Image (cartoon, helix red, strand yellow):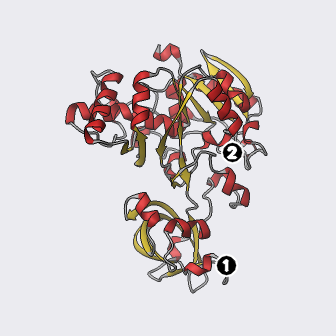
């Protein structure tokens, strides 16, 4: 049954001065709030390893943020911003990034009313490295502020190289500033690997080689998933009834080795809400394997529409068996899952996460994980000078045992 939730019940007072506009000079110098068994304490992020369960499994999202914000200019002089969201042709990310003369993307278009049917030229100084591509944009289809845009360029270079030279890192709009040189490095995790996100999995921004080494020394095993973060992930819910909010599809990739580790290890620590959503989607993909013979994308309200008789191990075994039968080392799928109070967590025991926007799907996920104590956690952070949102401080949250046992 889809829960009846009013997003106004998940609001808190966040003023602009509490939003971290820039990262700290050292990634691991941020504060760390620790919540466990109803108790809140604080430390520094560089001490994270000491608060983690020994020999547990820790899962990171290794997606890489794409410099997906491009600025074009009409012959009339009007500046048009084009923000690439997801590839349309070719539809696969790797093929779209490898294209050497043209590709099409679903985009958010700034100043869209000023763009008619003309072909736009990329706005850059003559003689710059970007000018050598002669990048152009043509509008194929328009829907309000979004549309499908075809890009063409010269030089026989892959589109990934074009974006690196021409694009800007799409920092969140709530920072209320332009992208700066520091963002190219710091709005990216150290372990970012697979291109595709238009927003960073921000929980990972705090990790340094020293923190990772301390985690290894404590005996935890590190594994990765890859979920490409879409622009809608951090948007507030529109309307008061959460059931009316539509989640967008996000593609993810999970190695077979992780599924096997999940089957044999207990105590999974997810780094970021994107890792949580990926991990929790795996159970329902296993259910698809049991009932339909193959995995399928996880739909938004699928976890709530009925009860499921299968154990977590049974679902994982079915998914592992299907992959082994197909000779696959990596599961490629997508999820629209929304995690709200009432959700049954099956794989995530603890998570590392930043402090999220009021009335967002991410606040709902935190509330689902820790129950009503989410208010205690956020009240503590507000009253103890924690920094909020993407460049803000961090927390380590253990699942509320009073709810989940």
In the picture provided, is 206 more to the left or to the right than 144? right
Q: Nearer the viewer, mark 2 or mark 1?
A: 1
As measured in the structure, the alpha-carbon distance from the residue carrying label 2 to the one carrying label 1 is 31 Å
On screen, residue 238 versus residue 170, left or right, reads left
- Figure quadrant of residue 111: bottom right
Counting the numbered discs, the total is: 2
In this rendering, position of residue 230 left or right of residue 204: left
The percent position of residue 221, horizontal first and vertical second, equals 54, 28
Expressed as whole percent of the image width and height from the top left, the position of residue 326 reads 26, 41
Rendered view: 393 above or below 102: above
Residue 106 x, y percent position in the rendering: 43, 63
The mark nearer the N terminus, 2 or 1, is 1
Q: Residues within 10 Å of mark 1 (few under 14, many from 20)?
A: few
Q: Is residue 258 visible?
A: yes
Residue at x 34% of width, y 22% of height: 313
Picture residue at 40% right of the left edge, 32% below the top? 259
- Give the residue at mark 2: 391
Could you tell me residue 390's position as x and y percent? 64, 45
Q: Is residue 239 visible?
A: no
Q: Quadrant of the N terminus?
A: top left
Circle 2/circle 1 CB separation < 8 Å = no
Outermost residue toward the bottom in this view: 75
Q: Residue at x 31, y 27 (%)?
A: 317
- Closest to the observer, 15 or 201: 201
Q: Quadrant of residue 289?
A: top left
| Label 2 residue SS | loop
Q: Please name whichever residue, 311 or 210, is drawn nearer the observer in this view of the structure.
A: 210
Judging by the rendered image, the residue that carries numbered circle 1 is 128
Give the residue drawn at x 42%, y 22%.
Answer: 264
Q: Where residue 403 is drawn, which disc sits there?
A: none
Label 1's element?
A: loop
Q: Determine crowd level at label 2: few under 14, some 14-19, many 20+ residues with C-alpha closer than 10 A.
A: many
């Amino acid at each position: 049954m889809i829960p009846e939730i009013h997003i106004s019940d998940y609001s808190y007072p966040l003023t602009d001065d509490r939003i971290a506009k820039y990262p700290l000079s050292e990634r691991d110098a941020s504060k760390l709030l620790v919540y466990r068994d109803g108790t809140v304490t604080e430390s520094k992020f560089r001490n994270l390893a000491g608060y983690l369960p020994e020999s547990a499994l820790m899962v990171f999202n290794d997606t890489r943020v794409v410099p997906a914000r491009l600025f074009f200019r009409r012959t009339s002089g009007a500046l048009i911003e084009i923000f690439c969201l997801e590839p349309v042709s070719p539809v696969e990310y790797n093929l779209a990034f490898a294209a050497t003369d043209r590709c099409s993307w679903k985009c958010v278009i700034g100043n869209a009313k000023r763009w008619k049917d003309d072909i736009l030229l990329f706005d850059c100084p003559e003689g710059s490295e970007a000018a050598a591509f002669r990048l152009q944009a043509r509008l194929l289809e328009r829907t309000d502020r979004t549309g499908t845009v075809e890009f063409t360029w010269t030089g026989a270079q892959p589109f990934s190289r074009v974006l690196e030279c021409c694009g800007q890192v799409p920092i969140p709009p709530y920072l209320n500033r332009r992208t700066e040189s520091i963002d190219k490095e710091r709005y990216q995790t150290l372990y970012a690997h697979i291109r595709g996100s238009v927003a960073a999995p921000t929980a990972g921004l705090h990790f340094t080689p020293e923190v990772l080494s301390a985690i290894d020394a404590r005996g935890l095993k590190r594994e990765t998933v890859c979920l490409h973060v879409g622009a809608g992930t951090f948007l507030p819910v529109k309307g008061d009834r959460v059931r009316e909010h539509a989640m967008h599809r996000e593609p993810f990739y999970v190695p077979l080795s992780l599924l096997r580790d999940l089957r044999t290890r207990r105590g999974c620590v997810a780094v970021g809400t994107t890792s949580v959503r990926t991990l929790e989607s795996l159970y329902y993909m296993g259910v698809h394997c049991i009932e339909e013979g193959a995995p399928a994308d996880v739909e938004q309200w699928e976890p709530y529409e009925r009860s499921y008789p299968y154990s977590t191990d049974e679902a994982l075994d079915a998914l592992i068996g299907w992959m082994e039968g197909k000779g696959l080392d990596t599961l490629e799928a997508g999820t629209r899952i929304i995690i709200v109070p009432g959700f049954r967590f099956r794989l995530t025991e603890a998570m590392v996460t930043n402090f999220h926007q009021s009335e967002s799907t991410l606040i709902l996920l935190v509330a689902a994980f820790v129950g009503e104590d989410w208010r205690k956690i956020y009240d503590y952070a507000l009253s103890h000078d924690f920094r909020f949102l993407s460049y803000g401080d961090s927390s380590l949250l253990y699942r509320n045992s009073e709810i989940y046992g």
